[in-house]
Amino acid sequence: MNTLVEFEAAQLEQLLDSDPLAARMFMENMQIPLDVQDSILAEAGKLRRRDRTALARVIEQHGMSELSDKISR
């Protein structure tokens, strides 16, 4: 998992807990399409334990990371 995804997950974790609208706006600023935002939020809502690592996995599954993990290797 790359640093960008970890940052996105940390921000999303905080925003989902405090202000869901701000979470949407954050994803909009990341230029995530609305249908993908819906999928990410749906999967985040299904998580038993919504933490940074779990959110990062969800983000990675939706392919929104612009940096490949292979770059850091």
Image: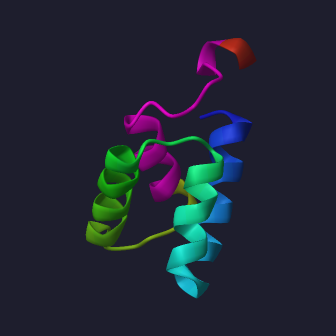
Residue at horizontal 73%, vertical 19%? 72
Estimate the x, y position of residue 45 in percent, counting from the top left. Answer: 32, 71
For residue 46, side relative to residue 61 (left or right): left
Total numbered labels: 0
- Viewer-side residue, 13 vs 29: 29
Residue 55's place in the image compared with 14, above or below, is above
Can you give x and y, in whole percent of width and height, for residue 27 in the image? 56, 54
Give the magenta range.
54-70
Position above or below: 23 against 33 = below
The N terminus is located in which quarter? top right
Q: Can residue 53 be seen in this view?
A: yes
8 on left or right of 58: right
Quarter containing the C terminus: top right
Q: In the rendered structure, does residue 58 fall within the stretch colored magenta?
A: yes
Q: Position of residue 61 (x, y in %)?
A: 38, 37
Residue sitting at 56 percent across and 68 percent down?
Answer: 23
Residue 20 image position (x, y, % from top left): 50, 78
**Residue 19 relative to residue 47: left or right:** right
**Residue at image point 52% right, 64% down:** 24
Q: Taking 57 as reference, is 62 above or below it? A: above
Residue 73 visible, this angle: no
Which of the colour schemes (rainbow, by chain, secondary structure, one colour) is used?
Answer: rainbow
- Vertical placement of residue 36 versus 51, above or below: above
